[in-house]
């Protein structure tokens, strides 16, 4: 029976099904969740489009929807609550643990803690078991406002200096809240699921060191990582993917395949390219230079140093000085290692008088840059302090902008096809008008350049999304976004429209009427830096790059020492046909040599024995296909050479 103060809710689920609930006026979100029909596993409610706290009231009719555990908001709530369950389990087991912070992150959660001893894998298993017990207890999670005196007294009694420091940093007058679950509560702003039983399937993954509040001068804490999913199967799938990602990590592959290394004696974030990796890099460099020169780009070399005055003029000093290495004062000038190539290319353009007939001028360079990245941010080849960018700047008239942008986009698509990259999307990156510090303050310039770039993309019929606040400080960008094999989104290629730097450097060309006018600059990068591209390719192909990119195309294997000279002759023929080959002449068994070539992801193996020598043949094995069989040596090499020339692997 209902009364006049009741409200009637139509609650929708993620499957567009709906449930009619009659609840008292002023019912809480948690109360509504307590009335869920059998089988509905919602973890929260979305009221008028906003995920609401379990303690919030619903005072009247509203647009209500369940937050399901397998949607992003639901996963975030479960993972945040799982972090609290982790903290509760730690307190139950260790008692005097100091708790730092425990947020939800992209694919899980973590908690930073200060413990007397490092946690072992066995300890993690015990903590996870305790977490499972807390989840099975299905205790309500309740939000409570507390006074500063109460919360300080609680953490002083526990001797938790980390929490006391966090509280001291919260301004007076700010509401302090805790979330309670059973005997445990944690200082937190929220949000959480209604009870521990709604957390789903959890797993602790590993631990790592983390300086308190990211400060290397503060104590080193233990960061415990975990994850949570709606179902055990979703969790199992994720754990399987984590193992696959571990095997694909370019740092692991680069070490095993001997492509690159780092040495403390050289410096952090400064990769050393070993012969195999250097071959891949050189192949990419030759490919992109040849491709660009065929399209009218002129390649240059410019210094890796630049004057501070140069970067002050360009505006980079104001925006990127913190990411540059310290300036070097000598001979009455201040120099820095260059963090980008743009200002140097402005000087290339300015080195000569330009007519409207000369434009567009396409200047390209494999330009080495240096950026000061914090040591904690350095990640293999993904994030380094020295990098070489496939860079170019196109100086053109305004009436040439659309054609030149279209040419760059076409180039990007051709290159991606050659590299075997077929999953990517386009993003138009605009300025944030409210951010007056980051972006040059010229509304007319921004409106014009953003409209131009959008028109080009639409004329080409490209699907795209828009992102506010992702532009360069001088102009909008068309970014090509990829998802790496490790599920990290990155910008691989970019096309940037720039009306600002020509003005800052007073760049001009003489128009048909004899008047000096300003060119427009299109900044573009196609295959990113050699470092980042190599990391991406290693992970994308799990080390098994397309044949044309592989450091070795063919491993020639003699069945015994009697055929070493024959194997070397095959290598010589391959080399003459621009097929990279090497002979394995080690004193090892044939099966071992074949397995080793497979482990090195070498595309082809030629086995040479008496029958092959007598018939000028080779026994061919192909990566991914196994044994192909015996065939004339000349035919086999010609077929591989054709694959390399076409940049396409074939099936034999």
Image (spheres, helix red, strand yellow):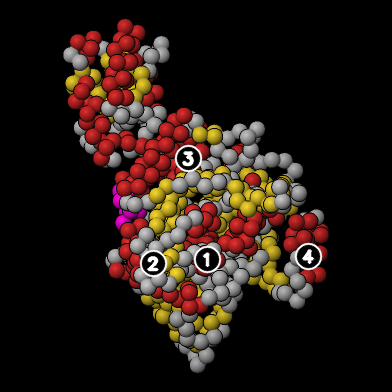
Q: 57 or 590, which is in the foreground?
A: 590
The nearer-to-camera label among 3 and 4 is 3
What residue is rendered at 44% in x and 30% in y? Answer: 276
- Provide residue 277's location: percent of width, then percent of height: 45, 34
* Disc 1 from disc 4: Cα separation: 52 Å
Q: Quadrant of residue 280?
A: top left
Asked if residue 283 is positioned above or below residue 111 in the image, the reply reads above
- Provide residue 459's location: percent of width, then percent of height: 29, 69
The nearer-to-camera label among 3 and 2 is 2
Residue on which the image places disc 3:
250
The nearer-to-camera label among 1 and 4 is 1
Q: Earlier in the sequence, mark 2 or mark 4?
A: 4
Asked if residue 411 is positioned above or below residue 536 in the image, the reply reads below
* Disc 2 from disc 1: Cα separation: 15 Å
What residue is rendered at 57% in x and 46% in y? Answer: 304
- Judge the density around disc 2: few (<14), some (14-19), many (≥20) Cα neighbours within 10 Å: many
Residue on which the image places disc 2:
397
Q: Secondary structure at mark 2?
A: loop
């Amino acid at each position: 029976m209902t009364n006049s103060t009741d409200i009637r809710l139509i609650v929708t689920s993620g499957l567009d099904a709906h449930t009619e609930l009659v609840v008292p006026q002023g019912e809480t979100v948690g109360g509504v969740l307590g009335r869920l029909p059998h089988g509905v596993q919602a973890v929260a409610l979305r009221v008028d489009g906003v995920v609401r706290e379990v303690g919030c009231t619903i005072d009247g009719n509203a647009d209500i929807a369940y937050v399901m555990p397998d949607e992003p908001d639901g996963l975030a709530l479960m993972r945040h609550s799982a972090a609290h369950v982790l903290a509760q389990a730690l307190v139950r087991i260790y008692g005097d643990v100091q708790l730092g912070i425990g947020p939800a992150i992209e694919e899980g959660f973590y908690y930073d803690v200060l413990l007397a001893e490092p946690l072992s894998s066995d300890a993690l298993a015990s903590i996870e078991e305790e977490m499972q017990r807390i989840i099975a207890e299905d205790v309500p999670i309740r939000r409570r406002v507390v006074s500063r005196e109460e919360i300080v007294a609680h953490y002083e009694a526990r001797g938790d200096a980390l929490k006391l420091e966090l509280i001291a940093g919260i301004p007076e007058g700010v509401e302090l809240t805790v979330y309670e679950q059973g005997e445990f509560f944690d200082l937190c702003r929220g949000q959480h699921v209604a009870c521990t039983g709604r957390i789903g399937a959890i797993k602790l993954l590993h631990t790592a060191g983390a300086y308190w509040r990211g400060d290397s001068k503060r104590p080193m804490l233990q960061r415990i990582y975990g994850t949570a999913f709606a179902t055990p199967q979703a969790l199992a799938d994720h754990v399987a993917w984590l193992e696959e990602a571990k095997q694909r990590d370019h740092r692991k592959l680069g070490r095993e395949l001997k492509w690159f290394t780092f040495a403390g004696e050289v410096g952090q974030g400064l990769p050393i390219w070993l012969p195999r990796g250097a071959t891949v890099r050189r192949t990419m460099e030759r490919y992109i230079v040849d491709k660009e020169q065929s399209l009218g780009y002129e390649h240059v070399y410019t210094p890796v140093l630049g004057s501070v005055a140069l970067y002050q003029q360009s505006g980079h000093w104001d925006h990127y000085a913190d990411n540059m290495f310290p300036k070097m004062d000598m001979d009455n000038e201040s120099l820095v290692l260059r963090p980008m190539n743009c200002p140097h290319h402005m000087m290339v353009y300015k080195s000569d008088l330009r007519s409207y007939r000369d434009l567009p001028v396409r200047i390209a360079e494999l330009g080495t840059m240096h950026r000061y990245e914090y040591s904690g941010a350095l990640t293999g080849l993904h994030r380094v302090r020295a990098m070489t960018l496939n860079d170019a700047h196109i100086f053109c008239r305004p009436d040439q902008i659309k054609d030149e942008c279209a040419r760059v986009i076409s180039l990007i698509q051709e290159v991606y096809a050659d590299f075997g990259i077929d999953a990517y999307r386009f993003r138009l990156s605009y300025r944030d008008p409210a951010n007056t510090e980051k972006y040059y303050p010229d509304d007319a310039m921004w409106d014009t350049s953003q409209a131009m770039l959008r028109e080009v993309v639409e004329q080409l019929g490209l699907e795209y999304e828009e992102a506010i606040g992702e532009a360069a400080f001088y102009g909008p960008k068309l970014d090509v976004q990829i998802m790496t094999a490790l599920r990290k989104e990155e910008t691989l290629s970019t096309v940037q429209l720039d009306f600002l730097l020509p003005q800052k450097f007073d760049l001009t060309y003489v128009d048909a009427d004899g008047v000096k006018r300003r060119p427009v600059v299109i900044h573009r990068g196609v295959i990113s830096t050699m470092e980042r591209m190599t990391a991406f390719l290693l992970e994308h192909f799990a080390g098994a790059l397309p044949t044309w990119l592989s450091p070795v195309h063919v491993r020639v294997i003699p069945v015994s020492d009697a055929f070493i000279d024959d194997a070397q002759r095959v290598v010589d023929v391959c080399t003459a046909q621009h097929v990279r080959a090497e002979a394995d002449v080690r004193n090892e068994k044939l099966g071992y040599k074949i397995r080793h070539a497979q482990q090195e992801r070498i595309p082809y193996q030629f086995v040479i024995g008496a029958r092959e020598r007598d018939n000028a043949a080779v026994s061919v094995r192909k990566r991914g296909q196994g044994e192909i069989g015996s065939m004339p040596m000349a035919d086999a090499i010609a077929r591989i050479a054709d694959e390399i020339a076409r940049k396409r692997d074939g099936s034999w």
